[in-house]
Image: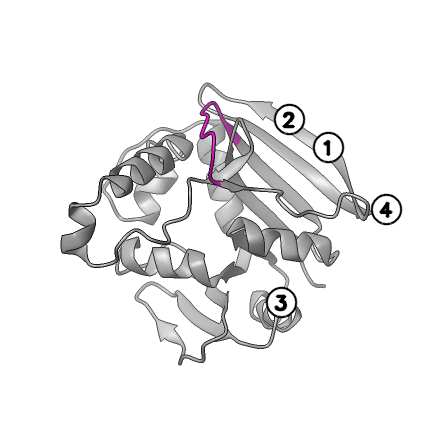
């Protein structure tokens, strides 16, 4: 039996899943070091995900060493990873990650990247292979479902990709780690969602010292 299709993201208190776009921030390492916008972007991104970095699971997954915090945040991070059999993401998220992920990318499963540009699969150490899908969100999801087997498919981001899948009625569940930070601008998680076609049912609300975990079942109106 096929698993669920779910979204799991961190979100700022004012509704953003990422700082302002990296587009326009120059790409070479030497130039990026001289661009103050990058420092601001990184600081915001780090604040949004600050709840993850101290976790034991995070340390283990990225092979950063032993130790780290345990508790409910750690359990949720581990459960999210373990339920995921494949992921789907947009090209912008991949482009940023390609420059910043470690050599052993943190997914350890197949990842299907929505793009307009053909590219051979990119295999990384540790079980992550990126597949580039040029024929739309349905085809990417079909491939991800097949790869995931009876495990779940995660729509990893960014926000435009998430909204495409939500509007198409293809998402079963949305989990949000609501962080106590304010961006003021950026990539708003639900920008463009068709609220007339989507209804949410809250199935979990669980606070921790750093973040509040919210989970919603997604229904069609």
Give the Cα distance between marks 2 and 3.
30 Å
Give the Cα distance between marks 4 and 3.
21 Å
- Point out residue 153 in the picture as x, y percentages from the top left corner: 59, 58
Residue 4 in view, yes or no: no
Which residue corresponds to the image point at 37% horizontal and 61% vertical from the top-left? Answer: 95
Q: Check if residue 180 falls in the magenta segment.
A: yes
Looking at the image, the residue that sits furthest to the left is: 30
Numbered disc in front, either 2 or 4: 4
Give the Cα distance between marks 2 and 4.
23 Å
Residue identifier under label 4: 221
In the rendered structure, which segment of residues is drawn in magenta?
A: 178-186
Give the Cα distance between marks 2 and 1.
8 Å
Residue identifier under label 2: 205
Is 154 situated left or right of 52 in this image? right
SS class of the residue under badge 4?
loop
Give the Cα distance between marks 4 and 1.
15 Å
Disc 1 packing (10 Å; few <14; some 14–19; many ≥20): few
Residue identifier under label 3: 137
Residue 119 versus residue 103: which sits nearer the camera? 119
Looking at the image, the residue that sits furthest to the right is: 221
Badges 2 and 1: C-beta atoms under 8 Å apart? yes
Residue 58 in view, yes or no: yes
Snapshot quadrant of residue 151: bottom right
67 vs 117: above or below: above
């Amino acid at each position: 039996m096929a698993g669920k299709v779910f979204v799991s993201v961190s979100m700022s208190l004012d509704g953003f899943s990422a700082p302002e776009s990296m587009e326009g921030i120059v790409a070479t390492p030497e130039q990026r070091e001289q661009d103050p916008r990058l420092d601001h972007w990184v600081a915001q991104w780090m604040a949004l995900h600050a709840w993850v970095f101290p976790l034991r699971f995070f340390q283990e997954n990225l092979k950063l060493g032993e130790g780290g915090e345990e508790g409910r945040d750690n359990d949720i991070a581990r459960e999210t990873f373990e339920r995921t059999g494949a992921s789907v993401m947009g090209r912008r998220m991949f482009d940023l990650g390609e420059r910043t992920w470690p050599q052993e990318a943190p997914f350890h499963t197949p990842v299907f990247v929505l793009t307009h540009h053909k590219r051979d699969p990119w295999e990384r150490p540790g079980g992550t292979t990126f597949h580039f899908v040029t024929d739309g969100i349905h085809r990417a999801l079909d491939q991800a479902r097949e790869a995931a087997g009876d495990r779940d498919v995660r729509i990893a981001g960014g926000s435009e990709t998430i909204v495409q899948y939500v509007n198409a009625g293809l998402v079963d569940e949305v989990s949000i780690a609501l962080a106590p930070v304010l961006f003021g601008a950026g990539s708003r998680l639900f920008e463009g969602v068709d609220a007339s076609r989507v209804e949410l049912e809250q199935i979990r609300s669980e606070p921790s010292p750093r973040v509040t975990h919210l989970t919603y079942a997604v229904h069609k109106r």
